[in-house]
Image (cartoon, grey):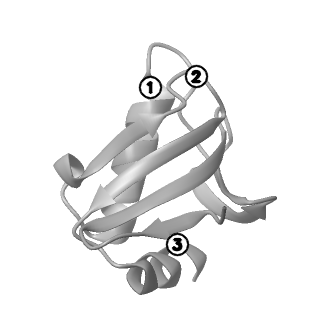
Amino acid sequence: MTWLVADGKGVTLRLHIQPGAKKTEVVGLHGEALKIRLAAPPVDGKANAGLLAFLADRLGVAKAAVSLVSGDTSRAKRVRIDGVGPSVVRERLLA
C-alpha cells in the first residue's frame, strides 16, 4: 500500500506523525507513509487537531472535509480528505 490512495470522492493518506516538533511541516516519505512533523504536543488530542487543520490549510479544503480514519493515539495515522484529487495532494504536500 502506498501513502496515497484515491477513489472517486477524495483520498486517504497514510501518515507517520512526529508531534512536539519545533514547527509543523511535511518531511517526506517514511517507509510507505508520508512523515509530518507537528508543533502541537500529543496531549488531549491537540496533535490530531493540529494535523487536521494543517492538512486542510495546505490542501485548500474545509476542515470538515478532513477526518481521522484511524490512529487516534498512534503516530501511524490514516486521514481521509474529501473533494480533492491525488495530483493536487502530491503537488501541495510534496512541493
Location of residue 41 in the rendering, given as x and y in whole percent from the top left corner:
57, 25
Q: Amino acid at mark 2?
A: Pro
Q: Earlier in the sequence, mark 2 or mark 3?
A: 2
Location of residue 79 in the rendering, given as x and y in whole percent from the top left corner:
44, 48
Q: Residue at x 49, y 66 (%)?
A: 5
**48 up-or-down from 11: above or below:** above
Tag of residue 46? 1
Q: Earlier in the sequence, mark 3 or mark 1?
A: 1
| Residue nearest the observer in this picture, 12 or 35 | 12
- Quadrant containing the C terminus is bottom right
- Quadrant containing the N terminus is bottom right
Q: Residue at x 74, y 60 (%)?
A: 32
Please report contact status of discs 1 and 2: CB closer than 8 Å, yes or no: yes
41 left or right, relative to 29? left
Give me the C-alpha separation between circle 1 and circle 2: 6 Å
Give me the C-alpha separation between circle 2 and circle 3: 22 Å
Q: Amino acid at mark 3?
A: Leu
Q: Quadrant of residue 49?
A: top left
Disc 3 is placed on an element classified as: helix
Q: Which residue was labeled with disc 3?
A: 93
86 left or right, relative to 1? left
60 left or right, relative to 55? left
Disc 2 is placed on an element classified as: loop
